Amino acid sequence: MNPSWELLTQAVESLRLLESVDSTNTWAHENLLPAWGVVLTLNQSNGRGRWGREWELEPGRGVALSIGVPLRGEGSDNGLQHTWLPLVAGASLVRAIKLIGVAEVALKWPNDVLVGSRKLAGILTEIDQRGQAIVGVGINVRPWDSELSRARISLDELVEVTSTTLDGILSSVILELRDAILLTPRETKTFVSSHLMTIGRGVEVLNQSGESWTGTAIGLDDFGSLLVRNDEGVVIPQRATEIHHLVQ
Ligand code: BTN
């Protein structure tokens, strides 16, 4: 991979390319990544995922980046609820990937980017010490050997990856995200819902203490929580939980 970053450079306020780094999100925290600044690497050694998991990346086989996203306060004129940001970031990434011709890509609540049941990209959203959001994005670009490879899919298996493919996706995701955080609450819900494959599906809900139950995902509430109807017909909003799609 010898990508060019011409469009991305134009879309952001600053672009820091790192030969290697432990985690771009950690780097963004430590170096106070500016609003709409991006730090990016093809060689991330200790990527962090949601729920304390590791985000695995074989050198050169994927891209890892973090984006500084201003929320309320300095440099920001939007009113986006913090709870919506992971979903809005996921929907923006889905749109950007669709633009390069991957029609089947969709969002699994809250922000896994899947093709079918296989994961193409993951997002980890954090808030730094100034209250600015860091949106960390990892995209699988080339397949690599691992026990995870059945659960994972890479861009290379979906489109021809050239030196400008990543530049196209990443510049689009920044532009999408810049627009999306300015949407009204109603527009935000419509935008996210239109890319979400989870609504209408049978799901298994897993909470932090390891308990699980099954139900049907029926929609989103005003905070972006997933509304799941259990077998007794009770609708329970899910916020800090993990869900699995049930095979249908
Ligand atoms: C997940 O699916 O659990 C989220 C994975 C997020 C990985 C990205 S790679 C760039 C950024 N830096 C990190 O350490 N993590 C995120």
Image (cartoon, rainbow, N blue to C red):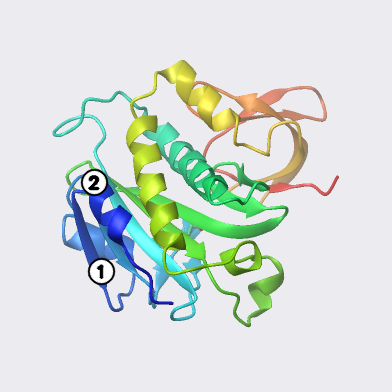
Task: Look at the numbered discs 2 and 1 and tell me whether their residues touch, using CB distance below 8 Å.
Answer: no
Distance from disc 2 to disc 1, alpha carbons, whole Å, reads: 15 Å
Q: Residue at x 27, y 25 (%)?
A: 78
Name the residue furthest right. Answer: 248
Q: Secondary structure at mark 1?
A: strand
- For the C terminus, the image quarter is top right
Regarding ligand 1, which quadrant of the image does it lie in? Answer: bottom left
**Residue 134 percent across, percent down from the top left:** 30, 50
Q: Which mark is residue 17?
A: 1
Q: Earlier in the sequence, mark 2 or mark 1?
A: 1
Asked which quadrant contains residue 23, the reply is bottom left
Q: Residue at x 44, y 33 (%)?
A: 84
Amino acid type, residue under disc 1 in the picture: Leu
Mark 1 burial class by Cα count in 10 Å: few <14, some 14-19, many 20+: some
Amino acid type, residue under disc 2 in the picture: Trp
Q: Is residue 176 visible?
A: yes
